Image: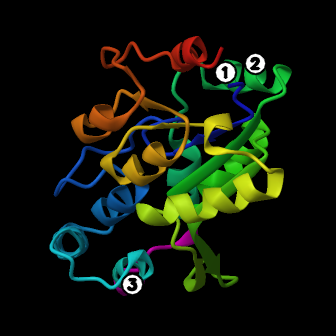
């Protein structure tokens, strides 16, 4: 069946990994921010990952709230946050891939447990049709973090948000594809007709329709187009 919608993970998929994986959690900007705030902040952020792994949180929003308290405690400011979210590079071939998908008339969506600022950047650069990101930060005039908006769109929650878009466009699972890289993408990868693990964790590769494995530094996102015919 023809693919009408392709859903993409963000960090590690369209963007290069910002940091290494820790505690079995996919690499993300969350960890890079904690590293910047110092050893104590990093240690506390790692403790939240361990708590998540042992089922200590009621859901993804509670985990984010715990991490946000760390950011506030150690003085995360808007200038550094924007430097980080704007500096992570796309994988080679990402812009060409989205341009080709647009030519083919395929809708695109982005769903991520990361930051809205980074998703907005991709939304503009790649002309993505729909984007969901878990955390939006709000700052006062002096660049201090004062409020936030949180969406439970990671792990199983990714599927909930994508199903809204599928229903809106009247699409079946067979008309939808997903591209991701982490074990947090498993629920969504299982729910669509075609899934591609892009230089992904073994857990995601095991359940995906296709796997793309490229040497570090030799990544080319255009390889996904081979599976979208």
Kindly report the distance in space between the C-alpha atoms of the residues bearing marks 1 and 2: 5 Å
Q: Position of residue 123 (x, y in %)?
A: 73, 46
- Residue 88, magenta (yes or no): no
Identify the residue under disc 1.
Answer: 97
- Pointer 2 residue: 100
Does residue 120 lie above or below 78 as drawn? above
Q: Residue 98: x and y, percent?
A: 71, 27
Q: Can residue 116 be seen in the rendering of this structure? A: no
Asked which secondary structure carries label 1, the reply is helix
Count of number-bearing discs: 3
In the rendered image, residue 74 lying in the magenta stretch gets the answer yes
Question: Mark 1 near mark 2, Cβ–Cβ under 8 Å?
Answer: yes
Secondary structure, mark 3, is: helix
| Magenta stretch bounds | 71-78
What is the quadrant of the C terminus in the image?
top right
| Residue 175, quarter of picture | top right
């Amino acid at each position: 069946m023809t693919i009408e919608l392709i859903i993409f993970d963000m960090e590690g998929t369209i963007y290069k990994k910002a940091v290494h994986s820790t505690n079995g959690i996919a690499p993300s900007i969350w960890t890079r921010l904690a590293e910047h705030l110092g050893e104590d902040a990093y240690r506390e952020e790692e403790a939240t990952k361990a708590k998540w792994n042992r089922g200590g949180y009621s859901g993804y929003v509670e985990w984010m709230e715990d991490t946000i308290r760390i950011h506030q405690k150690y003085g995360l400011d808007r200038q550094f946050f924007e430097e980080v979210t704007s500096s992570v590079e796309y994988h080679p071939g990402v812009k060409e891939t989205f341009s080709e998908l647009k030519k083919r008339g395929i809708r695109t969506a982005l769903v991520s447990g990361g930051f809205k600022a980074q998703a907005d950047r991709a939304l503009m650069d790649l002309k993505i049709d729909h984007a969901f990101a878990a955390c939006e930060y709000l700052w006062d005039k002096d660049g201090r973090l004062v409020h936030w908006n949180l969406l439970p769109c990671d792990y199983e929650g990714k599927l909930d948000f994508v199903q809204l878009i599928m229903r809106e466009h009247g699409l079946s699972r067979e008309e939808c594809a997903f591209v991701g890289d982490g074990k947090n993408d498993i629920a969504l990868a299982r729910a669509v007709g075609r899934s591609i693990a892009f230089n992904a964790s073994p857990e995601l590769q095991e359940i995906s329709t296709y796997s793309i494995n490229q040497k570090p530094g030799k990544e080319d996102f255009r390889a996904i187009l081979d599976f979208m015919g």
